[in-house]
Image: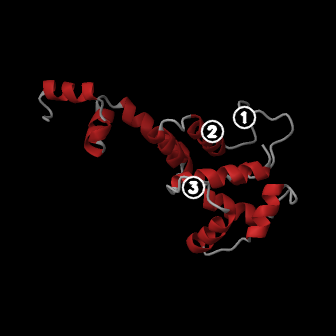
Amino acid sequence: MTLGEKIRYLREVEGSLRDLGRPMTQLEIVAAVKRELAKSISQSYLSQIERGSRRHMTQSSRTLLARFFKVHPGFLVDDPEGFHTELVSDLRTTEGRLDVWLLQASERFAGDREVSDVLLKVARHKDTRACFLLLGAILDTPGLAERLLEALRPEALKPAARLRRIGDGRRSL
């Protein structure tokens, strides 16, 4: 994937995260960067990157866009020729690999909006690895995942799980 394709993809993801129902425009990205990070990047610069007429970004622009899109700066380069997303380079950090994997998984699960949104949220979290370690700890504690889901998102429980809760005497409808 080229740098331009990645920027277009991230604009699409960002539009979805902001419930726009469409990709954010380059002008919307410029305005959001200015508003949220108090930094500037020009629309023409983004356009040149996306069109491929500017093949590389400055380090400061790469860092700025990585902060805005909440991706690893190493993601914002052209993939080497012959690169396959299934292969993992030893040079990438665990965090970067997780973020790329989560972004790709979010796209694959676009049909399940809740799952897709959660994958994006984890990818955008400042410490993706910690999110997975926390999830592992929750799942290692018997019954904790169900209790947390019941407390935080009772509407997400499947009907069969709600009926079991009633049978256990722990919850009533």
Which residue type carries mark 2?
Answer: Gln
Disc 2 secondary structure class: helix
Closer to the eye: label 1 or 3: 3
Residue on which the image places disc 3: 15
In the image, taking residue 162 as reference, residue 137 lies left or right, namely: right
Residue drawn 77% across and 33% down?
84
* Tag 2 near tag 1, CB within 8 Å: yes
Which residue is labeled 2 in the image? 104
User: Would you say 43 lies left or right of 80 here?
Assistant: left
* Amino acid carrying mark 1 in the image: Thr
The answer to whether 156 appears left or right of 75 in the picture is left
The secondary element bearing badge 3 is classed as: helix
Q: Residue at x 38, y 30 (%)?
A: 140
Q: Is residue 157 above or below residue 129?
A: above
Q: Which residue position is annotated with label 1? A: 85
Q: Position of residue 42 (x, y in %)?
A: 74, 71
Residue 123 location, x and y as percent?
56, 47
Q: Secondary structure at mark 1?
A: loop
Q: Where 76 sits versus 135, above or below?
A: below
Q: Residues within 10 Å of mark 1 (few under 14, many from 20)?
A: few
Give the image location of residue 137, x and y in percent.
40, 36
| Residue 47 vs residue 79, the one in the foreground | 47
